[in-house]
Amino acid sequence: MKKLEFLLTIFVAAATMFFACGGDETPGDITEKVYFSLADGEYDYVIDKLDTNGDEMTDEDREKLKKILEMSKGQIEKKGGIKAVSIVKEEISEDGKTCTVQAEVEYGNGAKEPANSKLVMVDGAWMLTVGK
């Protein structure tokens, strides 16, 4: 049941904001790369940027997530792909453990929409938080 709740949370996040959020890279860098990776079908990169709260992700979990991400990619394709991701604001907490990134995604059809991400520092790398 815990895995199902986790996967459903991921689905909601993917459907509503297409994901966002690594080591030496800034949270903004990660956010931008995650969006372009999603648009390019590079799902492993996106999945590797998810904070799993220390739980091991099985191959089955990864495959389920890839199917969910494919749906998000389809939505991006309907908008003409991603033309640009602009980081509007990157706010790292005083303790350096969390970050909020405000971005704007511009699609190939000219449409723009805000994309907000929350990240957490895990073992020296910024990771996307889901459902927190």
Image (cartoon, grey):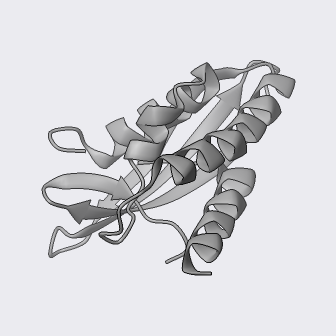
128, above or below 48, in the image? below
The picture places residue 118, in percent across and down from the top left corner, at: 44, 63
Residue 112 seen in the current view: no
The picture places residue 18, in percent across and down from the top left corner, at: 64, 46
Q: Is 95 situated left or right of 127 in this image? A: left
Image quarter of residue 30: top left
Going 64% across and 49% down the picture, which residue do you hit? 64
Going 25% across and 43% down the picture, which residue do you hit? 26
Viewer-side residue, 24 vs 100: 24
The picture places residue 10, in percent across and down from the top left corner, at: 61, 61
65, above or below 111, in the image? below
Q: Quadrant of the N terminus?
A: bottom right
31, above or below 110, in the image? below
Q: Residue furthest bottom?
A: 1
The picture places residue 65, in percent across and down from the top left corner, at: 61, 48
Q: Is 12 situated left or right of 115 in this image? A: right
Image quarter of residue 71: top right
Residue 131 seen in the current view: yes
Tell me how many marks there are: 0
Going 38% across and 44% down the picture, which residue do you hit? 48
Q: Is 12 situated left or right of 86 in this image? A: right
Viewer-side residue, 44 vs 86: 44
Image quarter of residue 56: bottom left
